[in-house]
Image: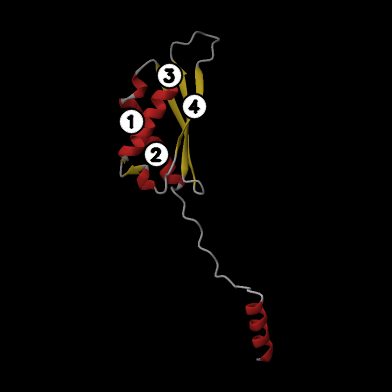
Amino acid sequence: MIKISLILIIMATLNIVIAAPSQPFLQIITEKDKSEVLAIIDRVCADSWCSGDYEYKFSTFSCNDNTAACTLTFKIIDRDAKPGEVNFRNKRCIFKEITSKEKIFTGVTLNEEFYDQLNYCVSNRESK
């Protein structure tokens, strides 16, 4: 009993704190959600950007839980490129302040603010 009391006094004197295990940081989105976001973007693309001179191949969507940012990578493929010319450009869009999957999509549709950012980014990347 004296040993335990002595240890507690030493710990209090040295400001040693025994912390409870911390909770793991919650992921913004799961792997399944990432696949769903890409599928929704593909469907949106068919109704918007993908009907022009370029074809789009959306390849990855990932989120960094520590920075609350998500990145979409894709290729813009020039359908009119001549043989031997490079006919694609690798592009990416970064979305900031994504703190939950509801900031990306709700059900089977994209969140309106996320869609606006996506539309602006893809259109901007096409012109460059």
Which residue is under mark 4?
91
Label 2 to label 1: alpha-carbon separation: 10 Å
Q: Is residue 109 or residue 71 the one in the foreground?
A: 71
Of the numbered discs 2 and 4, the one sitting upstream in the chain is 2
Q: Is residue 35 above or below residue 73?
A: below
| Residue kind at label 3, given as amino acid type | Ser
Do the numbered discs 4 and 1 sit on residues whose CB atoms are within 8 Å?
no
Of the numbered discs 3 and 4, the one sitting upstream in the chain is 4
| Element class at badge 2 | helix
Query: Where is residue 24 drawn, in percent x and y?
Result: 51, 59
Report the disc number at residue 37. Answer: 2
**Badge 3 density bin: few <14, some 14–19, many ≥20, Cα 10 Å:** few
Q: Residue furthest top?
A: 82
Q: Is residue 46 or residue 19 the one in the foreground?
A: 19
Judged by depth in the image, the label closer to the viewer, 4 or 1, is: 4
Which residue is under mark 3?
127
Judged by depth in the image, the label closer to the viewer, 1 or 3, is: 3
| Element class at badge 1 | helix
Do the numbered discs 1 and 3 sit on residues whose CB atoms are within 8 Å?
no
Q: Is residue 33 above or below residue 48?
A: below
Q: In the figure, residue 51 lies in which quadrant?
A: top left
Residue at 43% in and 14% down: 79
Label 1 to label 3: alpha-carbon separation: 19 Å
Label 2 to label 4: alpha-carbon separation: 17 Å
Of the numbered discs 1 and 3, the one sitting upstream in the chain is 1
| Residue kind at label 2, given as amino acid type | Val
Do the numbered discs 2 and 4 sit on residues whose CB atoms are within 8 Å?
no
Query: Where is residue 20 drawn, in percent x and y?
Result: 55, 70
Query: Where is residue 91 drawn, in percent x and y?
Result: 49, 27
Of the numbered discs 2 and 1, the one sitting upstream in the chain is 2
| Element class at badge 3 | helix
Report the disc number at residue 44. Answer: 1
